[in-house]
Amino acid sequence: MTVAPSTSFDAATASTAYRSALEVIGAVEPRVAAAISQELTDQRESLKLIASENYASPAVLLTMGNWFSDKYAEGTVGHRFYAGCQNVDTVEALAAEHARELFGAPYAYVQPHSGIDANLVAFWAVLAQRVEAPALAAAGVRHVNDLTDADWATLRRALGDQRMLGMSLDAGGHLTHGFRPNISGKMFEQSSYGTDPATGLLDYDAVRARAREFKPLILMAGYSAYPRRVNFATMREIADEVGATLVVDMAHFAGLVAGKVLTGDFDPVPHAHVVTSTSHKSLRGPRGGFVLAQPEFADAVDRGCPMVLGGPLPHVMAAKAVAFAEARRPEFAGYAQQVADNAQSLAEGLTGRGARLVTGGTDNHLVLVDVTGFGLTGRQAESALLDAGIVTNRNAIPADPNGAWYTSGIRLGTPALTSRGFGAAEFDRTAELIVDVLSGATPTATRDGGVSQAKYVLADGLAERTRAATAELLAAHPLYPGLDLA
Ligand code: PLP
């Protein structure tokens, strides 16, 4: 298979860099240095199927540990509220340029600290552009400070009186798409679209019908746990029909967009008014977020800090520049395709051994297993797999009978293990191990004669056998091969 960039680095040089860094850190607080070393050991020994996690390259990681961290840089490139930002300007401009080139976007904003922050920037930008700007124009002023108190009160009410339509949580949507535990659910009146109960697939006619009825300001697309492609051309048509702004959150699948696995109607960038993302999931960059936008939203997005963001993190923006540069290399497209191919192998390996998948399969980087066929809740499945050395997370499935806490599913993703060099055969073996563990887990009885939703027993020796098998797989595909901290 194609060598993934995170595994192609000079191991001797990286080892020297990390050993020296740990020596410097250990001289101040040895327990922190020890925890950093232990984290590498733990990650090396873990069969990580968390769909939102990955392994960034040593170049990306090292870029974050330096004096850029000390700089305040509120404002934008060339327009800072602090002096001495010339080098921050260099790295922020580079990160934005790489992001524009990588995704073919007219405009990129790389300051958001995370995916949640990127969404908040986008939501305020849409409110600013679609609600605030017309109100200022109608009042004949340029700035909110110049509004009369009465006009300001009217504008505040209008800003709070807007609607968002997003994918429901149990269909795979994200909390930040207008749900009450997130501020977006308090900013907007929210309504959801789900998936077809028979197929588990997005039903665009149902989305259209709901959008016509609800007339949202923002039509939100994107997901955390939907294992299929979304047709963003159709979503844009729906948005246009009802006068909504299409915001796509590609946090999960940005790597597949960057690597040209998702193209045409399935690439959100040419279709959405605004695209938000994380940089650390399938894109394999530093923890962080970014926003891509059509030109009419650029000025409003640029005001993200201090509107809703704390001061930019220049060391992380520098690492985004490095990660985006890596993602522009041809090897990254090979990696992204392998992520998708591996998800196919995992899905086929699971269904071939009797597991039921939501939607029956996948065409992105993740698989959602309905574990009720094994007589388990998602919580039991997650814990049983962890006992056996396989790291996953439980997840609700559409119309989940066990609710959002226990759930009925587990979500599995391929980006991290693909970064370690896993291919189709390793993912088929992983599927075999997962089905073995789920088949060998039995819920315990409760005192009142019912069945526990949390407790279970594993067949004798199953955890140990599976741990030995996962250790073998991991040893054949070491994480950061040759990186030696000793
Ligand atoms: N958007 C989606 C679709 C996500 O899946 C997530 C994270 O799980 C986020 C946003 C939030 O990202 P972050 O944890 O970086 O704030």
Image (cartoon, grey):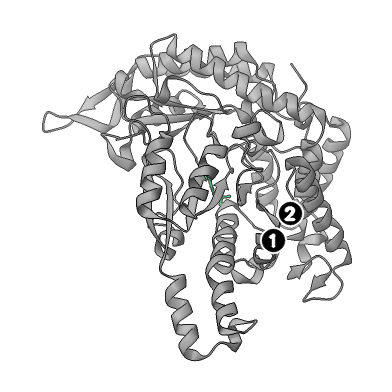
- Sort mark 1 into few (<14), some (14-19) or many (20+) by Cα contacts within 10 Å: some
Percent of width and height locating residue 427? 57, 16
Percent of width and height locating residue 205? 40, 36
* Residue identified by numbered label 1: 298
Which residue lies at the image location 55% right of the left edge and 12% below the top edge?
428
**Residue kind at label 2, given as amino acid type:** Tyr
Above/below status of 43 relative to 436: below
Q: In which quarter of the image is the N terminus?
A: top right
Q: How many marks?
A: 2
**Residue kind at label 1, given as amino acid type:** Ala
Which residue lies at the image location 84% right of the left edge and 76% below the top edge?
83
Find out whether the residues at labels 1 and 2 contact each other: C-beta distance under 8 Å: yes
Q: Which of 383 and 242 lies nearest the eye of the viewer? A: 242
Which residue lies at the image location 39% right of the left edge and 49% below the top edge?
212
Residue 107: which numbered mark, if any? 2
Percent of width and height locating residue 268? 61, 41
Percent of width and height locating residue 69? 76, 61
Q: Earlier in the sequence, mark 1 or mark 2?
A: 2
